[in-house]
Amino acid sequence: MTKKDLMKRLDELLKEKGMYKIESFSGAISWNYNKATISNAIKCLEATDEEINDYLTVVKLKYPNIYKTVVNNGNWLVHSHNRYAVWGMAKSVLA
């Protein structure tokens, strides 16, 4: 898949989720990022809300203070940074 295809899919998923951007730990994911990072953002957005809630449970067990911060920061499922952060942390814990 080309980078153009990945960015098109990312934009579609962002619109579907009602988000205007998704941020990694170093900023909003855009054309400047490599294909692997863009693919990870797509996988994060393709995950259902139920899966992401399960990942939040993993984060809650491993990192209780991060969990408190995330849930006290509004709707974290559509937050540009928190959704990707929870997804990434849970994936690394489960790996």
Image: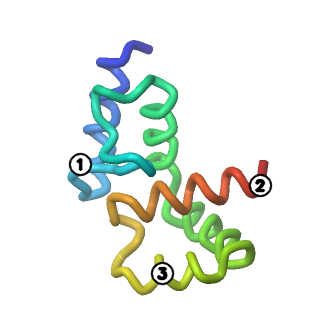
Label ID, residue 45: none
- Residue type at mark 1 is Lys
Where residue 23 appears, as percent x and y from the top left, is 36, 50
Q: Residue at x 34, y 65 (%)?
A: 79
Mark 3 vs 2, N-terminal side: 3
Mark 2 vs 1, N-terminal side: 1
Viewer-closest of 11 and 24: 24
Mark 3 vs 1, N-terminal side: 1
Q: Which residue is mark 3?
A: 69
- Residue type at mark 3 is Thr
Picture layout, residue 24 above or below residue 64: above
- Residue type at mark 2 is Leu
Circles 2, 1 touching at the beta carbon (< 8 Å): no
Left or right: 50 in relation to 38: right
Distance from label 3 to label 1 (Cα)?
A: 26 Å
- Would you call the spot at circle 2 few (<14 residues within 10 Å), some (14-19), or many (20 or more)? few
Where residue 58 appears, as percent x and y from the top left, is 70, 69
Q: Which residue is mark 1?
A: 15
Picture layout, residue 68 above or below residue 19: below
Task: Determine the residue located farthest toward the right in the rendered image.
Answer: 95
- Would you call the spot at circle 3 few (<14 residues within 10 Å), some (14-19), or many (20 or more)? few
Foreground tag (3 vs 2): 3
